[in-house]
Image (cartoon, rainbow, N blue to C red):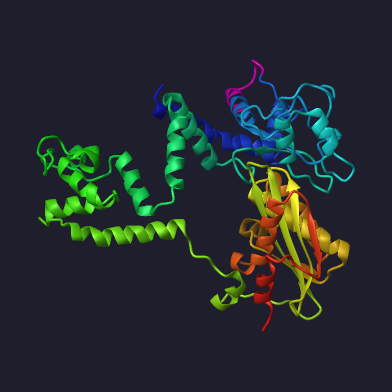
Amino acid sequence: MSRGWVFEIFLSLTRHCWQCWRLVCHPNTLAAKVLKQCYFPDNSVLQAECKSSCSFLWKSFIWRIELLEARSRWRLGNGASVSIYKDRWIPRPITFKVISPTVLGESASVQMLKTVTGSWNLELVKETFMKEDVDLILSLPCSSSNVIDSFMWHYDKLGTFSMKSAYHIGCNLASNSSLSGLNLSNSWWKFLWRIKVSSKVKLLVWRACHNWIPSNVNLAMRGMKVDCSCPFCSTKPESTIHALWFCPTLKKVQTMCSFLRNLKYIRNGLVHASNSIHAVDIIPWADSSLEDLKRVNFPLVIDYGAHRLRGISQRPPDVRQFKMNLDAGNDVVKRKAGIGLIVRDCSGDVLASCALSVMGGFSLAVAEATTIRRGISFACEVGLFPCTIESDAQLVMNLINSNSFPLSEIGLVISDICKFLVDYPSCTIVYTPREANVAAHTLAKMGLKSSSDHYWMEDVPPCVAPVVMGDCPS
């Protein structure tokens, strides 16, 4: 089957999957109530069956519900309704199930793996599951409140079914159906975009791989009436690979200039303007390319202690108020996160700071939300009220301000944060740019590299001291 057919079939299915998703997530709508009364009065829509007497509409719905279920999983709340070994709750496509042998019994629920406070029972998890399952389980954040389990779409960061996520799945299916070297191709493109060279060089290589270089052969393929032979050697057609690598005339230029992107300008100058090229003309191009290379590989070192001079300064809190700056960092490979926290008063004096190391392969958004929740909990324990909490996590700030709770794991943390803000109205959370949150960012990187937690009372580590001095009001 061709790539186009696979993609079109999948995309046509996803257009109708949206109505099925509404049945799963919005069971109180009129259509959902009518279908429930007719076809699954005693079960949920995910447990509905398709009998021979069912209508054609319901049969088509059942088929698409199974398609949704195959790419969805449970978002854990209290874990009471999710089976450890039977249900799909591990963030591991495509099965979403544990691979460890059954130890706790077939009917054991995920709630057995949690403590009374709702956090993971680390000893029980590590004793029961294999390391691959342990890493994935600990990457799921826990909620301090008794939230019920819900269904989420795995391929969207907010957990909601969308045509955008379905489009990417369709593209992957189409590629996997016809390209045996897909993994090699993907690794090549990732390698290209990670190379520390000028963006102009990367763009030229990308255009060359897609035959978007305006050589004579490519122009003729697009309907232009041109002579396909090479205008220099006149021995072979001027294809992309011939114009950039194999033309004997341009090879002389390659010996003088190793920067590939200049060949295009040299070739166009010789063909269209009859400009001859000399060795002295290569020097400005080489200097320019060398400066681009230095700028990419050796970025300017910014003195964060003097960042107030660039117009971005810390906003001091009001009198008799406190301010807490938070930031988080994550390491997906090591499956850990770092938390940075610093508390100051209205005069800029540091009251407390810490660099925490948290095990768990959280996504960056979940790590940032967990950091804010940890900061509010710290403020409640110490009594830092009234308090202003600043973070540079724009996505998390938008979710908190909109009071919306996504179906994904980050929704659990956002729900806990909003409940804290209702109980403690004197605590406010605001967004601050990264340049004004450097102290917390440095502490988060320190926690990410460390294997233990570090606390300082009325002090900061030496690497943060210049930043704090630059933040002090003049």
* Residue at x 59%, y 67% (from the top left corner): 435
Name the residue furthest bottom.
Answer: 474
Screen quadrant of the C terminus: bottom right
* 405 displayed left or right of 269: right
Residue 58 on the magenta span: yes
Above or below for 159 versus 175 = below
Drawn side of residue 456 relative to residue 303, left or right: right
- Residues shaded magenta: 51-61
Q: Is 168 on the left or on the right of 394, as rendered? A: left
Q: Position of residue 124 (x, y in %)?
A: 85, 33
Question: Looking at the image, is 378 positioned above or below residue 72?
Answer: below
The picture places residue 177, in percent across and down from the top left corner, at 45, 24
Image-quadrant location for residue 378: bottom right
Instruction: Return the residue nearer the eye: 319 or 465.
Output: 465
Residue most extreme to the top: 52
Question: Which quadrant does the N terminus fall into?
Answer: top left
Q: Quadrant of residue 33?
A: top right
Can residue 112 be seen here?
yes
Residue 9: in sight, yes or no?
no
Residue 223 drawn above or below residue 265:
above
Q: In the image shown, does 372 or 334 lie closer to the viewer?
A: 334
Asked whether residue 82 is drawn in magenta, I would say: no
Q: Position of residue 22 (x, y in %)?
A: 64, 39
Q: Nearer the viewer, residue 44 or 351?
A: 351
